[in-house]
Image (cartoon, rainbow, N blue to C red):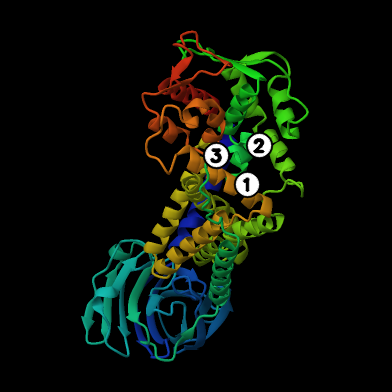
Amino acid sequence: MKKVILAAIILFSIVLGNSVHAQSSFEITDFQATIRVREDNTYEIFEKVNVRFFGPSERYQRVIPLTMYRQKISLRSFEGLSTAYEMKKTSNSVAILLGESDIAVAGDRSYSYQYTLFAGEDSDPSKDFFFLNVLPDESYGRILQAKIEIIFPKEFDITSLSVNVGEPEDQVFIPVEIRNKQITIRVTDEELEGKKLNVYLVLPEGYFSVSVPKNNVFTSLTWIANATILFLIVFSLVVCFIFRNKRIKRYSDDPLPLMAEPPIEAAYIQDGQTKERDIVANIIYWANAGHVGFLVPENIKKPGSVHIVKKENLDHTAKPYEKEIFNLIFSDNEGLSLSELSDILKAKKNEIGDWVHRYYRHPENMLFSRKVSLLKEMIRCSSSVPFIYFTFKTFYIYTGRSGLSLLLSLISSLLFLMLPQTISIIVQQAKTGRKGLPSPVFWLYASVSLCLTSFFFLLVYYSDILNPGEYFAMVLSGILIFLFSVLTIGRTARGNEKLEYLIAFKNHLLNVFNNIIRPDSDIVTRFFEYLPYAMVTSDWEKCCSRLFNRKVPTPFWLDLGNVDEGYIPIEEVKKMIAYIIEELSRS
């Protein structure tokens, strides 16, 4: 055991010794560089390096990076002034091996060389900039002291100059001397701490008079993306204008055409959806027809207190989806509580919606045009194009990898789309008056999309390459395209006729020609017949408020136990319906 431990210690000592020797095989006692910047954005660089080797070593290596603040640059020429050299190129750098390949060096050596870098391609059309890692990438050797002189062809704004140690975004700055058009930097080993030294200077557009725009992945796609997005906005606007939800003004005192159909159809006319409130309205509709009864005790908010009782089956005149919903609710028993009904509706919500949608998708019953529905979905999907583009551009700038950037942008765009989806629901509810909040999961996605949008705007704000105005325009474009798809509601001729009946009913219900509703008005005497349709048009609250302190005739199907002379206060009705809807909509 002792031999094993001893062998391990010896092996560890050898490895550690070799590592230390490799890391300290030489040090740079003095580094001198003169950089002349030309108007075509080329840098003519002369360097003189004094190196002290601690023992017989291989050739000195100077690594020249070929990236400039996430932008590629090129090495146009290199000339060794004091010794032979060998070049080894990679995609991101050029390694210069100075000295003879078969001769070991030791002691103090001096190397002089000059080379030219070209960075003429302009990645940002709004400004020029100078960026350079001016010290060699010698992670295995110390630089005791260095002096760098950078000579520019024209005057520049010194307030935009940044000289820092480490990575470009690090906040470790070095003081410099500026005289006329020359920058002089002096640093020591204590200041460098083995890190890079970067010089970054923002210049006005046109400073490099012959620089050309950079032709990379996202700049070559910019004009295509902008043209595509502009086309999508115009196309969506035209489709929305042609197939918009037309405002039909038909003032009538006859609500009977609408009331000839189930309340679910009245709800479906507005936005093509079926909600919990629509099911409750249809149950009241069945109650008025003698198929259902309600048992409501005095303490209405006691759990399980409100019961819905089945009296008789629907007749042959009922629509297929009505029969399916009725049989679903009253399949196993004659009556059920609100909590039981809530469980059924939550479990079968999508199935109920499919039944209604399937009925009104038949040509003879169709309320919404299939062609317009297809256009709406195409526009809705195309609204992700702006999000995909600007997330791709952001990821590409920070990673330089187009495939990975595209994958990340597609994933991010799915979350981004929840933001316009949330906005569209708010707009749609404000437009139709159909209240009801999305599920908590939906709000979670909306919150994530909002946070993601804020995060990307922070990246843009703190980046010198990305353009905040372009990103804001992209987000706005995506939201606009999505909203146009929401506002596009192309009804068939039958759908427009049903909408006329719906508007006529609402006008009659709110009594637009008379601000005072008389006690003998049919709005009062037939209140419970109107109630199911008022619920799906979201006007029942307004009607109840206008009937404040009134009593309406109690229907035969409502057993309250404390009815006064066959009449019930409107406030009790409002409280009962609000409680039922609240219970059925509870997540």
Q: Earlier in the sequence, mark 3 or mark 2?
A: 3
Find the distance from the CA under tag 2 to the CA under tag 1: 10 Å
Residue name at image x 60 percent, y 66 percent: 402
Disc 3 and disc 2: Cα gap in Å? 95 Å
Give the x, y percent position of residue 143.
Answer: 35, 69
Q: Tell me if I can see residue 211 in this picture.
A: yes
Q: Which residue, given by chain and number where applicable, does mark 1 sit on?
A: 498
Please name whichever residue, 399 or 239, is drawn nearer the observer in this view of the structure: 239
Q: Nearer the viewer, mark 3 or mark 2?
A: 2
Which label sits on residue 210? none
- Residue 247: % across, % down: 52, 55
> What number of labels is visible?
3
Residue 140 seen by the camera: no
Q: Which residue is found at the position 74% from the left and 29% from the top?
A: 324
Near-viewer residue (566 or 205): 566
Question: Can you tell which quarter of the image residue 106 is in?
Answer: bottom left
Residue 396, image quadrant: bottom right
| 235 lies above or below 452 | below
Q: Amino acid at mark 1?
A: Lys
Above/below status of 310 relative to 220? above
Q: Position of residue 245 (x, y in %)?
A: 56, 55
Where residue 48 appears, x then y in whole percent? 38, 82
Left or right: 571 as drawn, with respect to 585: left
Disc ID at residue 261: 2
- Using the numbered discs, state the Cα–Cα distance from disc 1 to disc 3 in whole angstroms: 94 Å
Callouts 2 and 1 close, C-beta under 8 Å:
yes
Q: Outermost residue, front direction?
A: 520
In this rendering, the answer to whether 432 lies above or below 474 is above
Residue at mark 3: 6
Q: Residue furthest top?
A: 561
